[in-house]
Image (cartoon, rainbow, N blue to C red):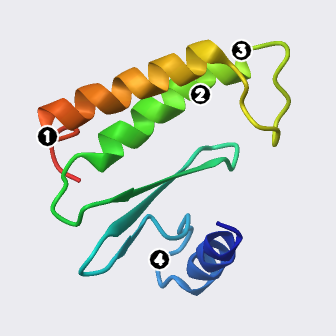
Amino acid sequence: MAIFSVLFAIGSQLSPEVGSSGIEMLETDVFKLHCFQTLTGIKFIVLADPRQSGIDVLLRKIYEIYSDFALKNPFYSLEMPIRCELFDQNLKSALEIAEKAGTFGPGS
C-alpha cells in the first residue's frame, strides 16, 4: 500500500479543488479501491466489487472499531500491528453483517 500512499499524496497536490484531501476512490472494471483518511492522517483502504454500495459507511464503521479497540488499548502503539482479540472479533462481525446484508449502507 506504499504505492497508494504516494498516489494519494500526488492526488492531493494535483487536485484542482483547493484543500483536496487526496484520492478517495480508484475505480476499474474489476474493483473499486476506497480510501478513508482520518483527521490524524490514518488511512483505511477497502477493495470492493465495483457494484457494491455503501463502502463509505463500512469504512467509518471500521474506523469506529479501530478507535474503540485499538486506540483505547494501552498496550497498542501507533504503526504497530493490531494484536487485540476484541478488535478482531468486532471487525469480523461488522464485515459478516455487511456481507449478509449485501450492501453496506446508502450510496457509495
Q: Which residue is tagged 4?
A: 17
Residue 101 in percent (x, y) is at: 14, 32
Q: Determine the secondary structure under disc 3.
A: loop
Q: State how far apart marks 1 and 3 are (Cα).
A: 31 Å
Q: Which residue is tagged 2?
A: 66
Circles 1 and 3: CB atoms closer than 8 Å: no
Above or below — where is 72 with respect to 57?
above
The amino acid type of the residue labelled 3 equals: Lys
Residue 72: mark? 3
Q: State how far apart marks 1 and 4 are (Cα).
A: 33 Å
The amino acid type of the residue labelled 2 equals: Tyr
Circles 4 and 2: CB atoms closer than 8 Å: no
Left or right: where 44 falls relative to 77: left
Q: Residue at x 59, y 28 (%)?
A: 66
Q: Nearer the viewer, mark 1 or mark 4?
A: 1
Q: Which residue is tagged 1?
A: 102
Q: Determine the secondary structure under disc 4.
A: loop
Q: Can residue 68 be seen by looking at this rendering?
A: no
Residue 30 in percent (x, y) is at: 27, 76
Q: Determine the secondary structure under disc 2.
A: helix
Left or right: where 47 falls relative to 28: right
* Label 2 CA crowd tier, 10 Å (few <14, some 14–19, many 20+): some
Q: Residue at x 49, y 70 (%)?
A: 23
How many marks on residues? 4
Ranked by sequence position, the earlier of labels 2 and 1 is 2
